[in-house]
Image (tube, rainbow, N blue to C red):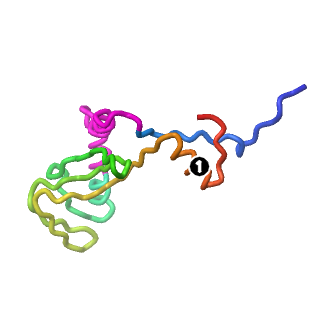
Amino acid sequence: MSAPAISFYDLHPAPVSLKDKDTAVLNATYSDSQNITAGFNLNLLARINHELDANFNLSAFKHVAFYNADEGRIEMHLENMIKQTIIAAGQSFEFVLAERLRTEYSYKYDTEEFQALAELACFVPHMV
């Protein structure tokens, strides 16, 4: 007897970053010593410079990331370190010292929360 055929629609692995990690571990993951995440984050400004003919001074922004336990998410920001005026797509934007651009929320779930979310999307978790 042969095994039943498995179609593409039968399996959907869903990688999930769980929030049951220590806050220090979560913070270190998004503020890594090799600045990989910072480079990824600053690339947003580089793309805006390229695609919208902007003049962001990338070295005048620093990457800031932290875990917000109340919201269950990592928050990533780019913090302006000088007063500057940015031109993008022909419009002018004033940035004050320490002003932050929010660039990403990365939500974390516990197993039960993710299973409930999956079920709302009509997925049936078979294995965790």
- Residue 87 is situated, as x and y percent measured from the top left of the image, at 20, 68
The magenta stretch spans residue 23: yes
The residue where tag 1 is placed is 118
Q: Dot 1 surroundings within 10 Å: few (below 14), some, or many (20 or more)? A: some
Amino acid at circle 1:
Ala
Residue at image x 27%, y 45%? Answer: 66
Which residue is farthest bottom? 91
Residue 120 to residue 19: above or below: below
The total number of labels drawn is: 1
- 7 sits to left or right of 15: right
- Location of the N terminus (image quadrant): top right
Nearer-the-camera pick, 11 or 124:
124
Tell me the SS state at disc 1.
helix
Name the dominant secondary structure of the magenta segment.
helix
Quadrant of res 89: bottom left
- Residue 61 is situated, as x and y percent measured from the top left of the image, at 18, 51
The magenta stretch spans residue 39: yes
Residue 120 to residue 112: above or below: below
Nearer-the-camera pick, 111 or 80:
111
Residue 117 to residue 17: above or below: below
Magenta span covers which residues? 20-43
- 113 sits to left or right of 33: right
